[in-house]
Amino acid sequence: MQSSAACAVAGWTSPNRWETLCALQSLLPLLKKAATDLRRADMVYWFEQADAEVANIIRGHPSDATAIPALIASCPQDRQSVAQA
């Protein structure tokens, strides 16, 4: 995912939640790559989900806390499986 235009345009002058979200959004692809290199499909899955959630928050879409149980249930269970990026 590319940095959100909202992050680039915002021009925040002091650290706040938006700046933190933008920083997190820039780190998630690196974390996903590291998890892929470690062959940890479960971690890749969670970093992908976090990336999507951060993007939604930045775009102003509300978070769906009721979706968390379904996300947990669909998480890859085999920790030895090869992560596909």
Image (cartoon, rainbow, N blue to C red):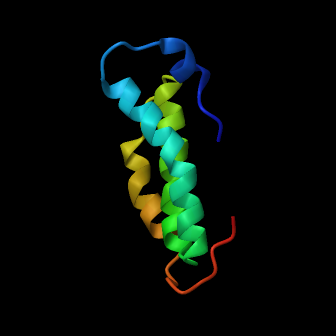
Q: Give the residue drawn at x 36%, y 12%.
A: 13
Q: Quadrant of the C terminus?
A: bottom right
When the figure is inspected, residue 9 is found, relative to residue 34, above or below; the finding is above
Q: Give the residue drawn at x 50%, y 71%.
A: 42
Determine whether, in the image, residue 33 is placed left or right of residue 12.
right
The image quadrant that residue 83 belongs to is bottom right
Residue 84: where, in percent of width, then height? 69, 70
Outermost residue to the right: 85
Q: Nearer the viewer, residue 14 or 80?
A: 14
Residue 8: where, in percent of width, then height? 56, 20
When the figure is inspected, residue 21 is found, relative to residue 34, above or below; the finding is above
Q: Is residue 61 visible?
A: no
Q: How many marks?
A: 0
Q: Nearer the viewer, residue 69 or 17?
A: 17
Q: Give the residue drawn at x 56%, y 59%.
A: 32
Q: Is residue 23 visible?
A: yes
Q: Quadrant of the N terminus?
A: top right
Outermost residue to the front: 13
Residue 57: where, in percent of width, then height? 46, 31
Q: Give the residue drawn at x 30%, y 23%.
A: 16
When the figure is inspected, residue 29 is found, relative to residue 33, above or below; the finding is above
Determine whether, in the image, residue 5 is placed left or right of residue 63.
right
The image quadrant that residue 62 belongs to is top left
When the figure is inspected, residue 63 is found, relative to residue 39, above or below; the finding is above
